[in-house]
């Protein structure tokens, strides 16, 4: 399944390269909401909240009320997750909050699962240089995506793996890496990071991996 993404920064829809360099920005989110309305799921990320430089919560609420979204960015508590679900999000994505002192925070994950419900939780595995990175992809950790996934699997409904090294570059995502991670979990698995074609989406779908696509759609490289 193809999942289009909407990334928000400064009240605009944006696309970044490797989470740092601005490549595209759009003042209005309306054309994208209309375009993505046909999809069963859209990924909505508040980049300002992820980077701890404010937030776009009002805009997130507007979009989540109109589109079926899984929402992420700066969610660090069960209360914050619940607030997003109450405003219309189908699921919430957590990443940085799940790593403490360089390892999986299993206790926090268990608490989230108890309070929110496993089926509403997607845990992010953001990998750069082979290691999980947090705080808006700015802080490296010593843990790998596979290690984090194995520790947290009982407490979420799915995993979102982002290959930061290729994010926004439209060079393709490393299929072998995704395939290994897919084989290591029975949970739903979603991949992102440089996906550039329908053929790639279809290849991922064939191994039961959903594909988040941003830059290829926004540049018109892939029809959506």
Image (tube, rainbow, N blue to C red):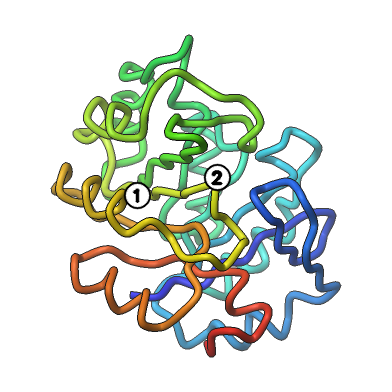
Q: Residue at x 45, y 14 (%)?
A: 102
* Dots 1, 2 in contact, CB < 8 A: no
Circle 1 packing at 10 Å, graded few (<14), some (14-19), many (20+), is many
Left or right: where 203 falls relative to 143: left
Q: Residue at x 55, y 45 (%)?
A: 83
**As drawn, 136 above or below 140:** below
Residue 115 in the image: state x and y as whole percent: 34, 32
Residue under circle 1?
120
Q: Residue at x 74, y 66 (%)?
A: 13
Residue under circle 2?
83
Q: Nearer the viewer, mark 1 or mark 2?
A: 1
Residue nearer the viewer, 18 or 89: 18
Left or right: where 41 falls relative to 120: right
**Rendered image quadrant of residue 153:** top left
Residue 10 in the image: state x and y as whole percent: 84, 54
Residue nearer the viewer, 208 or 6: 208
Q: Residue at x 74, y 75 (%)?
A: 29
So how many labels did they put on this image? Answer: 2
Give the alpha-carbon distance from disc 1 to disc 2, as whole Å.
13 Å
Helix or strand or loop: what does disc 1 sit on? helix
Circle 2 packing at 10 Å, graded few (<14), some (14-19), many (20+), is few
Residue 37 in the image: state x and y as whole percent: 53, 84
**As drawn, 1 above or below 102:** below
Residue nearer the viewer, 32 or 59: 32
Residue 107 in the image: state x and y as whole percent: 33, 16
**Rendered image quadrant of residue 113:** top left
Which comes sooner in the sequence, label 1 or label 2? 2
**As drawn, 102 above or below 195:** above
**As drawn, 193 above or below 20:** below
Look at the image and tell me in which quarter the N terminus lies.
bottom left
User: Which disc number belongs to residue 87?
Assistant: none
Helix or strand or loop: what does disc 2 sit on? helix
């Amino acid at each position: 399944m193809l999942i289009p993404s909407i990334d928000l920064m400064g009240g605009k829809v944006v696309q970044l390269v490797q989470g740092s360099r601005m490549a595209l920005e759009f003042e209005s989110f309306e054309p994208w909401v209309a375009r993505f309305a046909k999809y069963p799921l859209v990924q909505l990320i508040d980049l300002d909240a992820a980077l701890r430089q404010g937030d776009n919560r009002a805009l997130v609420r507007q979009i989540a009320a109109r589109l079926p979204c899984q929402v992420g960015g700066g969610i660090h508590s069960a209360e914050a997750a619940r607030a997003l679900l109450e405003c219309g999000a189908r699921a919430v994505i957590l990443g940085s909050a799940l790593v403490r002192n360089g390892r999986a925070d299993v206790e926090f994950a268990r608490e989230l699962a108890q309070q929110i419900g496993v089926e509403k939780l997607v845990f992010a595995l953001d990998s750069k240089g082979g290691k999980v990175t947090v705080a808006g992809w700015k802080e490296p950790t010593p843990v790998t995506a596979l290690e984090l996934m194995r520790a947290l699997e009982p407490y979420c409904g799915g995993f979102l793996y982002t290959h930061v090294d290729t994010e926004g570059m439209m060079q393709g995502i490393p299929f072998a890496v995704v395939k290994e991670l897919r084989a290591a979990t029975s949970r739903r698995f979603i991949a992102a990071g440089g996906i550039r074609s329908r053929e790639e989406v279809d290849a991922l779908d064939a191994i039961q991996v959903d594909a988040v696509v941003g830059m290829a759609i926004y540049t018109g490289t892939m029809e959506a």
